[in-house]
Image (cartoon, helix red, strand yellow):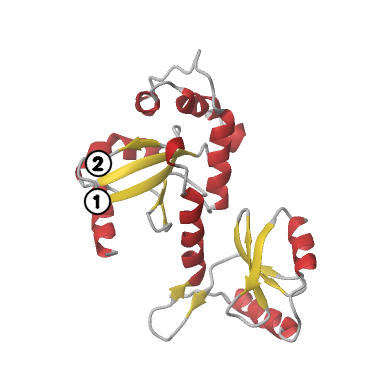
Amino acid sequence: MRFFGRTLLATVVAMTAFSASAKPDEAAITKKLSGIGLVPVSISESPLPGINEVVTERGIVYVSDDGGYFLAGHLYQNDGAQPMNLTEQKMAKLNKEKLQGMEDEMIVYPAKDEKYVVTVFTDTSCGYCRKLHNEMAAYNDAGITIRYLAFPRGGERSRNFGEMSAIWGAKDPVKAMNEAKSGSFDPNGIEQRSELVNKHYQLGVAMGVSGTPAMILEDGTMLPGYQPAPMLRKMLDSRG
């Protein structure tokens, strides 16, 4: 498997050579990244000399000590056997932390014999989201509880942003979601929780969600796209 293209690898080498003897200028890094819409949350050393791991509100980037160069991608540790995705591991940890305390904001479909809990960023206009929802009984029968967060893919500009805001504002959000997924939901007269839906959307962006459905496992690992219930259960079992 090819993890780095020639251009990316050359950039890594150049960045390392350029800044290996310097110390990270956190002020410069913050200023330069903020100028392109990447606001640093934390700056720390990466395993690569002279390159820093910067957690931003839109994911992880790797930045030179002076902030003049950055990489957006996954960093792998190669021990000669199975490469380890260090970026994915870090993002999973961050994702798990971000979801803590959000249970009351989720629309939950519990399994009677719960073995696993999967959080799904969903969009009512998404075909594969509807497919997943139509198979909810299969997920629940497989011991998988599904918890929904809102992710109208165009953010506040989405045509269904109001609909999703009304679903989360409904007296019975589960019933409202069921109706929306079947195309029979009427949002008229329902108080819209637009701030909450926008909060979920921004959270998804920060976690790296780029499409729906996006599944977040209990350890924070993200699985992009639709996964049939039997396949998802088999994968979850294999993770131990």
Direction top: furthest residue: 189
Foreground residue among 123 and 201:
201
Foreground residue among 53 and 9:
53
Residue 205, visible in the rendered structure: yes
**Image height of 105 relative to 94, above or below:** above
Tell me what residue is drawn at x 28 percent, y 59 percent: 235
Direction front: furthest residue: 101
Quarter that holds the C terminus: bottom left
Residue assigned mark 2: 111
Q: Position of residue 8 (x, y in %)?
A: 61, 74
Q: Count of labels shown?
A: 2
Tell me what residue is drawn at x 52 percent, y 27 percent: 165
Residue 226, visible in the rendered structure: no
Tell me what residue is drawn at x 75 percent, y 56 percent: 34
Q: CA distance from mark 1 to mark 2?
A: 8 Å
* SS for callout 2: loop
**Mark 1 touches mark 2? (CB < 8 Å):** yes
* SS for callout 1: loop
The amino acid type of the residue labelled 2 equals Ala
**Image height of 232 relative to 182, above or below:** below
Q: Residues within 10 Å of mark 1 (few under 14, many from 20)?
A: some
Foreground residue among 80 and 54:
54
Q: Position of residue 232 (x, y in %)?
A: 28, 53
**Image height of 18 relative to 234, above or below:** below
The amino acid type of the residue labelled 1 equals Lys
Q: Position of residue 124 (x, y in %)?
A: 44, 32
Quarter that holds the N terminus: bottom left
Residue assigned mark 1: 115
